[in-house]
Amino acid sequence: MSGFVGSRFKQFARVLSRLVRHTVGLYYLRTVSIFLAALILINARSFPLVWHVRVLRHLVGWNLRKALSPNKRRFMEVTSPVAQDPFKSVVTHKYWAGPDDCDFLGHLSNSAYAKNLDIARMKVCITNLRPFMLEGGWMPLAGADYAFLSEIPMFSHYEVRAKVAGWDDKWIYLHSEFVTCPNSSRTADKVESAAEVAAEMTLDIPKHKPRSVRPDGTILHCTAISRYCFKLGRLTVPPRVALAICGFGIDRSNWIRSASMQAHGGLRRFLEGGWRDEKGWDLTEFEEQRLAGMDWCKKLTQGINAASW
């Protein structure tokens, strides 16, 4: 009888042992699966072609809305910068400092600023320059300069604010700011504290003083100046002309003239050189702001141009 009980006990022990091993195995498998899924999720923005989707989604979205609009002429006018000041037209794009964009110091990598500014610049083009683009125009980037002022800690929400800084006969300069928007003084203190820790880890001597909250409630982390020109095939279109045909100005006159040429199929011919024979496309009403902006933009680019020879 005792032998029978011992045999049954051994069988039960073996079954229990297999059950425990199976349960532990499932637990570890589930844990590893969750970890891998989380790793893939937080790095999804760095997958192949995701950058292209992020850059082009503004263009695709606008074209889709235009295709669905019952009144396309009205849609063009409503979504264009008609009677706007180019120096007051600010385009904002929001981001998140995920682990895929951050370095081993726990803050946004310097390379991520350039990668994400591409997305903001595309949004600027779609927001302000669609009429020019619809005629086959494009805006190649000729250069960009960055000043890194303070760190953006990992997991922070930040935004890029871009606006026109100035233009000359060939180049237009875009001024972009990377800012965080702390919703309380406690959040601001956390951002500044993280910036202090990161500065200590980089062994900066002397230590950079963390940026304080500005009057508009933001903290400035980086500023960038990008230089573009307007191209129609191989032809260069002056920035003042490209901006004017998109509707910028103190009133609706530029837009009315541009829309009339577009309706009669003459806008492309105008951009290909017809502007040389027509007056009133110089945006002289913004000349004071343009000259002031070009004063400091040229100071920035003179050294770069000298070093390029």
Image (tube, helix red, strand yellow):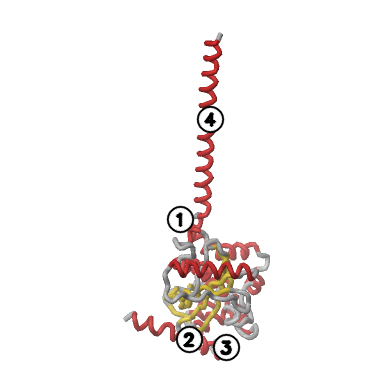
- Secondary structure beneath label 3: helix
Residue ID at (57%, 78%) = 246
Q: Which corner quadrant holds the C terminus?
A: bottom left
Residue 20, label in figure: 4
Check disc 3 and report the residue beneath it. 286
Residue 249, label in figure: none
Q: Amino acid at mark 1?
A: Pro
Closer to us: 85 or 299: 299
Tag 2 and tag 4, C-beta contact below 8 Å: no
How far apart are labels 4 and 1 at the CA level? Answer: 41 Å
Check disc 1 and report the residue beneath it. 48
Chain-order first, disc 4 or disc 3: 4
Residue ID at (48%, 86%) = 296
- Secondary structure beneath label 2: helix
Give the foreground label among 2 and 4: 4
Q: Position of residue 153 (x, y in %)?
A: 52, 65
Chain-order first, disc 4 or disc 1: 4
* Residue neighbourhood size for the residue with mark 4, other residues' Cα within 10 Å, grouped as few (<14), some (14–19), many (≥20): few
Tag 2 and tag 1, C-beta contact below 8 Å: no
Give the foreground label among 2 and 1: 2
In the picture as drawn, the residue positioned furthest to the top comes out as 1
Closer to us: 221 or 301: 221
Check disc 2 and report the residue beneath it. 296
Tag 3 and tag 2, C-beta contact below 8 Å: no
Q: Amino acid at mark 3?
A: Phe
How far apart are labels 2 and 1 at the CA level? Answer: 38 Å
Chain-order first, disc 2 or disc 4: 4
Q: Can residue 230 be seen at all in this image of the molecule?
A: no
How far apart are labels 1 and 3 at the CA level? Answer: 43 Å
Tag 4 and tag 3, C-beta contact below 8 Å: no
In the picture as drawn, the residue positioned furthest to the front comes out as 2
Placement of 20 over or under 168, stated as above or below: above
